[in-house]
């Protein structure tokens, strides 16, 4: 059993209510419920965190380190393109993570092509909507299992 944390950045609390053409019609709760079913079926604990505030995400990553969280699935949202602070929290705690985006930032405005996370992520999933979180969770669980001593 491992602790897995799902972190979502600013405005993702609005999922399902606005811009469904870009971000899909599922709410964040819909996505989280599916992830909980997948993680629990494989005997893992899963926690969810969403914040519109950069420092709260930094603090949650610090707490995850104290809680021995084994893996983070992270959609930093707009902080993807700006946040050295969240990047530094991930580097400091060395918690492995997968970066997920609902949309494909490379198919949007040029400023979305820069990520402060992709080069330090174990993997990156773009443009698959809510399915991206499920695939990231599956990959995280496999990596957790593979890193266990035999
Ligand atoms: O595609 C993604 O997942 C993004 O991380 C979403 C961010 C955007 O800044 C990134 O470039 C790519 C924006 C999240 C906004 O979330 C909303 C959800 C519903 C309605 C309006 C905004």
Image: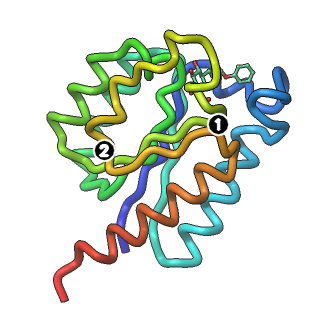
Task: Tell me: 148 left or right of 139.
Answer: left
Q: Name the quadrant containing residue 50.
A: top right
At x 39%, y 26%, the residue is 57
- Write down the residue under mark 1: 102
Which part of the image, by quadrant, shows the N terminus? bottom left
Left or right: residue 5 compared with residue 145: right
As helix, strand or loop, the secondary structure at mark 2 comes to: helix
Q: Nearer the viewer, residue 3 or 92?
A: 92
Q: Is residue 69 above or below residue 38?
A: above
- The residue that mark 2 highlights is 64
Residue 48, compared with residue 4, is above or below; it is: above
Q: Position of residue 40 (x, y in %)?
A: 56, 71
Q: CA distance from mark 1 to mark 2?
A: 23 Å
Ligand 1 image position (quadrant) = top right
Total of numbered circles in the picture? 2
Coordinates of residue 63 in the picture (x, y in percent): 29, 39
Query: What residue appears at the point 27 percent right and 17 percent down from the top-left corner?
Result: 84
Categorize mark 2 by other alpha carbons within 10 Å: few (<14), some (14-19), many (20+).
many
Under 8 Å from ligand 1: the CB of mark 1? yes
Q: Is residue 39 left or right of residue 66?
A: right
Q: Residue furthest bottom?
A: 150
Q: Position of residue 135 (x, y in %)?
A: 57, 59
Question: Which residue appears at 51% of the width and 78% of the height?
Answer: 42
Along the viewing direction, whichever of 120 and 74 lies nearer the viewer: 120
Q: Which secondary structure, mark 1?
A: loop
Residue at 45% x, 64% y is 139
- Local packing at callout 1 (Cα closer than 10 Å; few below 14, some 14-19, many 20+) is many
């Amino acid at each position: 059993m491992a602790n897995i944390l799902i972190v979502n950045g600013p405005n993702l609390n609005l999922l399902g209510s606005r811009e469904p053409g870009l971000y899909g019609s599922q709410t964040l709760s819909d996505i989280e419920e599916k992830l909980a079913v997948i993680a629990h079926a494989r005997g893992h604990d899963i926690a969810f965190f969403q914040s519109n505030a950069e420092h709260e995400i930094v603090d949650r990553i610090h707490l995850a380190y104290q809680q021995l969280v084994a893996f983070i699935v992270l959609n930093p949202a707009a902080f993807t393109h700006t946040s050295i602070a969240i990047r530094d929290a991930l580097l400091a705690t060395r918690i492995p993570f997968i970066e997920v985006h609902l949309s494909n930032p490379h198919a949007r405005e040029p400023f979305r092509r820069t990520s402060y996370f992709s080069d330090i992520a174990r993997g990156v999933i773009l443009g698959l909507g809510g399915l991206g979180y499920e695939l990231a969770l599956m990959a995280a669980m496999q990596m957790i299992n593979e890193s266990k001593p035999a």
